[in-house]
Image: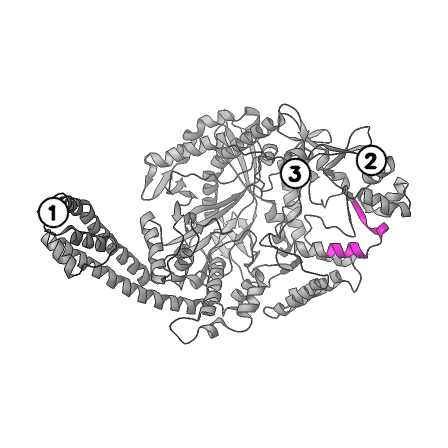
Amino acid sequence: MTAVEWTVQAGPVLLDVRLLPWFLVRAPGHPIELVDALSSARLLDMADELIVMERALNTHEREFLDEHWPALRRVAKSDPERAPAPFRELLRAYRRIESGDPLDDRANRALTAAGVTRWAEEWNLLLGRRDTARTKAAQELAAASSDAYRQVARAFDEPSLRHAVFLSNPGFYRNALASGPLTDRLGNGAGPPRAARRRLATAHRYLRRFTTRCETVAFSGPTLFGRFSPDQAEPLHVGRPGPPRVSVEASVWAVDLLERHLTSITPLAGRRAWRDPTFRRLPGKDILERTVDGRRLKVPADLLQLWEGADGRPLGEIARDAGIGEEALLDALRRLSRLLTVSGHRSAATELHALDALAAADRPDGPATALRSVRNVYAAEPWPARADRHTAAEEVIAGLGERPDLEGRHYADREVFHEDWSSPYSERVTIGGPALDGLRRALDAVLPMTYLAALLAREDAREVVRYALRGEGAPLARLAAAALEPQWPRVERMRAALAGLVRDGHAAGGVAALTSQDVADAVADLWELVPEADRADPCLPSPDLMAVGEDLATATWVLAELHDDCSSVFGGLERTVHSRPDLLWREFEDAVRDLVPAETMATIVSRRRSAHVTPELPGASIELSGLSARPRAETVPIGEVTVPPDATTAIVRGAPRRLYPGDLSSPLHRALALPALTPLTVEIGAHTPRITIDGVVVQRARWRVRHPGTPAAEAVERWAAMHRLRVEHGLPRRVFVRHPAEPKPLYIDFADPLGVDDLARMREGELVITEMLPGPEELWWRVDGRAQCAELRLGCLISARTKGPHDDSRA
């Protein structure tokens, strides 16, 4: 695996960076033009005009309330005889003004008598202009909304979008799309009927997500592997398309159902048994301790031998070794029911082809065999013919009994199958030297800052764990179950130092333009918070970078996300549609072994929840809630692992080991793991400008805004309320919005009337808003001439060393 290598300085440390040659181009698979077509520039201009008029009216109102009314009220109440008009008449005019009503003749006479004739005339004039603008805006809003509904309906005439909805939500596909085109439901009136509007609103949400988001666990969007080619003169080369590869696997809950089925048909002696990994035997005693809470159980010698032999072998074999006969086995299992997992078949947490293994263990006419057959036909069928096969898959599952309650399940594990497929351009895209130069500069800006933040976070986490240990070692499982309150004082000091840079005069034109030297100087003293022995440690981050501009050689790079573990790029679900998946993973494993000795490392194996797989990396596998795929000699139950008082490693069979990051952020995991590089969010208040380091965007502009809730009944008022919010906070036209009730950020184009209405209908709560960058006109990935949002997910292996007197910071 030939990598691109160079060195960058991070304070007193040199980071030797290996940018691995394979990367993922993560694009949603649908052109941005589909959602951009919903916008109305005219409507956006009318919103701005209306708000200008509203502000002029509000200013005029304040003039009366603050300047004229106090004097009029004082004179009218203190000396009615000298008052220019009866107080009740002035009060009546005041109330009309306060409620935003025009002044009638009676009110005008009172104000004329009071000497504010010109103000009153201007009030009615401004009010009339505002109302006229509002009426025109309401008409334009209705027309633009009707047009947007039509555009949404037409967009879903595209088979690829219908397929994407099917993958995400087969129920909605069947109810809304399978019976015919959405355009048939638009009706003949000015807008679609109410029932159709609800379906179109849901389709509109899908359209926004499918054209703008690069999902971590994709519902749609092909997998596209690319390679770096440093000697290539072209910044980007896209070869001729080829046939896609399709991978379809059973969901986690479907695998669970099939495993229970196999258990039910497997004779007792043929079922396999595993010890509960949270228990351990106390040395020299017939006592098992549940390490989560220290509870101890005295166990008879024969049962203890049965428990210790439960390493995944058949029960009959384990029972014979323990001297337990077939008749006594059932009673023994009852007595050990809380200490064992017994199954006819159990899939490893990292198994990528569980359905094949289940079918191999099933009867020829069994449900696992039937589901595999359906899956094979499903995967071979073109869209939309495969939709019918999905119904057949659901029928197989229904034959196992009641479908489980999927409420609370991971959002990407609610259907029978996970489906992934490769782009026709996968393994046909190469990025050459001119673009690589820009990528190197981007990583040079990102890595030093995030590496120090990772070290500080680890020190903070170790302090939390040390406090819980109180000077004594403890079982890892007990600490994992404890409520360790995160405390990040060192990280907060770094965040404050960077916020100071942004706040103190570096922001101009909406951008806080920093240099690497600015950042290095601001955080230099924070290196003293990391023990010298812990400053140089390897890590394996996975940056997601986006490019602003059509030419990758000259584009501005944006840090979209930063994951602390790049192993899923090479060993996750996407690997299944690579032409040489085993070689891809084997080369990555070898590179990791070169980075850090396997005998010093360990992976925590937890139960899989979705299509996403975090692979088992070289070293020991510590089983927590999931089953390792490694030979039993290379695994260890978590109950046998302890954490020493210094909280720097896990003790596995008497030897210290560190954990791989694995995208886990708990203080315990951070304390015991290699440095976990993740984004360091900086905020300086309600609005934080875009932050760049050496021209690289390390954080998009962001806002914290309170959503007022209680949406108005009138569409035009809901629309106007959101535009007031936009103008008040200086929001750009296109943003992503996070709301506490929404699991994912929502794309909002303020020129899209349907998107604005969706935003208006949200409940009250704090919105975290970020600018869309790059925008639709700044995209580089143009498949068949149609621009798509796209990011590069990279794999980096970084070794660190203390800088010597003769070291250069670059190579």
- Please state the horizontal and vertical placement of residue 57, each as a whole percent of the image: 22, 54
Q: Would you say the magenta stretch is mainly helix, strand or loop?
A: helix
From the viewer's side, name the closer residue of 10 and 376: 376
- Please state the horizontal and vertical placement of residue 626, each as a whole percent of the image: 69, 45
From the viewer's side, name the closer residue of 203 and 193: 193
- Please state the horizontal and vertical placement of residue 333, each as a whole percent of the image: 82, 45
Q: Quadrant of residue 523?
A: top left
Residue type for callout 2 = Val
Quadrant including the N terminus: top right
Residue type for callout 1 = Pro
Picture disc at residue 593: 3
Locate residue 409 relative to residue 652 in the image: left or right.
Answer: left
Label 2: few (<14), some or many (≥20) within 10 Å? Answer: some
From the viewer's side, name the closer residue of 64 and 586: 64
Q: Quadrant of residue 310?
A: top right
Picture disc at residue 299: 2
Magenta residues span: 258-273
- Name which of mark 3 and mark 2 comes first in the sequence: 2
Mark 1 lies on a secondary structure that is loop
- Name which of mark 1 and mark 2 comes first in the sequence: 1
Locate residue 309 relative to residue 184 in the image: left or right.
Answer: right
| Label 3 – label 2 distance at C-alpha | 41 Å
